[in-house]
Amino acid sequence: MVDFKVEFNVLEKDADYFPGCAMEWDPTTGVIKLDPGKYLCEIVAKYDMTNIHPSPIPLPVGRKIA
């Protein structure tokens, strides 16, 4: 049987990142907070969209799509 940790060089540590979200746990209250901000920043940087201008709607009002 193959030792998964050795074969894939896996390290065990406390969870601080959930796929797509930073994760924070408060042991006194048991509350887990998920923050997608880090993931969103990574995606924006990956696709070189750091200089885009946001729009409140995707198309101008009244625009017809044929």
Image (cartoon, rainbow, N blue to C red):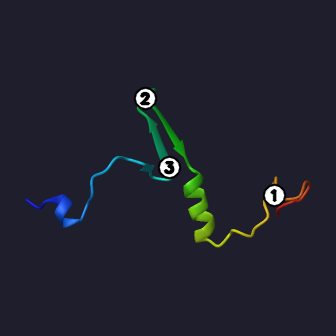
Residue that label 3 marks: 22
For image coordinates 51% across by 50% down, the residue present is 21
Q: Earlier in the sequence, mark 1 or mark 3?
A: 3
- For the point 44% across and 51% down, the residue is 17
Q: Name the residue located 59 percent from the left edge and 52 percent from the top edge.
A: 37
**Amino acid type, callout 3:** Ala
Relative to 26, is 46 on the left or the right? right
Q: Which residue is mark 1?
A: 55
Q: Residue furthest right?
A: 62
- Residue 1 vs residue 5: left or right? left
Judge the density around disc 3: few (<14), some (14-19), many (≥20) Cα neighbours within 10 Å: some
Residue 58 location, x and y as percent? 79, 57
Pointer 1 local density, CA inside 10 Å: few below 14, some 14–19, many at least 20: few
Toward the viewer: 2 or 16? 16
Q: Which mark is residue 64?
A: none
How far apart in space, not on screen, are marks 3 and 2 (Cα)? 16 Å
Residue type, numbered disc 2: Gly
Question: Residue 53 falls in which quadrant of the image?
Answer: bottom right
Callout 3: SS:
strand
Q: Where does label 2 land, which residue?
A: 30
Helix, strand or loop under label 1:
loop
CA gap, disc 1 to disc 3?
A: 26 Å
Label located before the other in sequence (3 or 2): 3
Residue contact at pointers 1 and 3, CB within 8 angstroms: no
Q: Nearer the viewer, residue 11 or 66?
A: 11
